Image: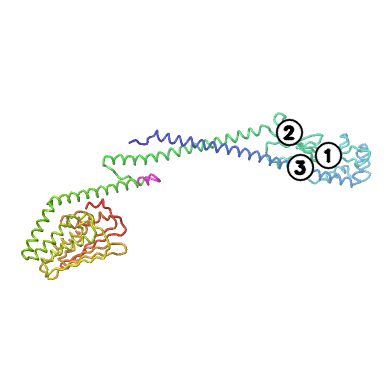
Amino acid sequence: MRTLNENDLSKVIMRFTYILIFFITLLACFTLFFSYINVIEKEKNQNLQNIQQITHYMETYNRILSGIVTEIYQNYDLQENLNDYYLSSPAEYMEDILSKDRSPTYLVDNLKKLVQDDEVKNISISLDYEKYLSAYAPTKNEKISFIRSLSFISEDMPDATLILDVSINALKKSLFPTHYNYSLSNGIDSVNLSEDISPSKWKKTQQIAIGNHTLQVYENPNYSSQTLLGLAIMIFLLMSLFILAIHQLLNRSFRNYIQQYQEIITSLNHSSTGDYKSINIENKVGDLKEIAMHINQFYLDNATYQKTLYENNWLKQEAKYAALQYQIEPHFLFNNLEFIRMTAILNDDEEISDSIYLLSKLYRNNTYQPDIIDLKEELINIDLSLQLHQRRYRHNFDYQLIDHIDQLMLPKLSLQPFVENYIKHGFDSSKKENRLTVYATETTNHYVLKIVENGKGMDQDKLEHIQQKLNDDIPYSENIGISNSFRRIKHLYPGDTRFVIESQLHVGTTITIKIQKGGNMHVENCNC
């Protein structure tokens, strides 16, 4: 018998691993595709949010700048001082300021009052970039300049401009990190909100006007391929780890499986030599445990069947032996019995004639009836034998046969041994009233046959000994007829067939046979 070996195990595991790799690769491709789409979509959404954030930032400071210009427009004193500052010489301006009892830093102080925002690093006014008035010292922080004309101050100052320098650090921190870069320009200078923009690395995709500024959006053209490559590497590593873990798990699982399987094969191989050992199911799990249980049950049932077959063969041999003992030509016996009966009639001996007739009829029934007969025919045979016995003990023996069963098939001569056992062991010729009654009744679930007699009975020890032998289905040599009768009935009706003996010494014995209704007759098991 071929057994599963390591090569078989390796092939099974490798096939399963290849199939697993195929499906995992397919799953990885779908995962890679949707992950890439998700990342790109997320980047686009973050780019839109960044543009909105920059636009909001620029519009906010454009409004602040407009407010400052409005305040200057409404402050005539400040306009007059600015006009004097830009049109007079420094000496003339200082002389004028001092004559009005004002501080030399009057203009600077007023400029500082125009804005109260931490992000505004400087506010200044220039006249054609030749004269320059600044509220604060120049800063090295990254900034964006907002410029607005102040030509309304004086016709002599058509090029006067207000410059608001705002830090972009807070704006840069508020932006989402993406593969996009942003540049702001006011026509004079520009500032990058991300890293330095290299024409070889960045590609301009959008240009948006925000007031006097222009927002330019750049995209890294290599980002898509880099992202795809990164996702592919990550998914490949995860997939490799997963496949490796599954492969190791399969190895362990199959090795445990093969060990259990090999134990089952070994037990089956031993069974071919007649040395079957029950499979240990304690270390089996799942389907193998169920298979082992079924195999054990099969061999247990087979052993029971072999035992039954052996017993049936034994019964056959007994029947053949009995047939050899009574191998007399029936016609020869019947003819001679009929001759004797006719002689008795001629001699006016009616009693002998009737007895020979009963004996001849009983023997004829036993010879020519089939192996399986109806209960009514069995009771007729019992009646014939009891009539013969009653002729011998007509004054101290009586019997009764009560049949309330419409139809019940039984092995021929299956009840006769119980009657003969009573006549041989239970009948007391010194007793005035010997009675034997055979009842045949039925309940909802059983046919009930009872043989009740008031013979010698038996003590409790002997009763338990006989009952135990019959319950264990062991041939009992002292009452071989009763034992065989019960076994023949049980083989014909292998369902719930019970046999009970009740007896009391010097009182009598009751034998009860219960046969379950609805069961199928197993004629092939009867060997009647």
Label 1 sits on what residue type? Ile
Q: How many angstroms separate mark 1 from mark 3 (CA)?
A: 17 Å
The quadrant in which residue 216 appears is: top right
Of circles 3 and 2, the one toward us is 2
Quadrant of the image for the N terminus?
A: top left
Label 3 sits on what residue type? Thr
The front one of 65 and 120 is 65
* Residue that mark 2 sits on: 204
Reading the chain from its start, which is encountered first: label 1 or label 3?
3
Q: In this view, does 31 lie above or below 451?
A: above
The front one of 26 and 358 is 358
Of circles 1 and 3, the one toward us is 3
Q: How many other residues sit within 10 Å of disc 1, few (<14), some (14-19) or many (≥20)?
A: many
* Residue that mark 1 sits on: 147
- Residue drawn at (85%, 40%) of the image: 148
Name the element at disc 2: strand
Residue 163: x %, y % from top left: 83, 39
Left or right of 525? Residue 130 is right
Q: In the rendered structure, does residue 52 fall within the stretch colored magenta?
A: no
Q: How many angstroms separate mark 3 from mark 2 (CA)?
A: 18 Å
Left or right of 11? Residue 470 is left
Residue closest to the far top: 200
Mark number, residue 481 = none
**Span highlighted in magenta in the image:** 283-292
Reading the chain from its start, which is encountered first: label 1 or label 2?
1
Residue 170: x %, y % from top left: 73, 42
* Residue that mark 3 sits on: 55
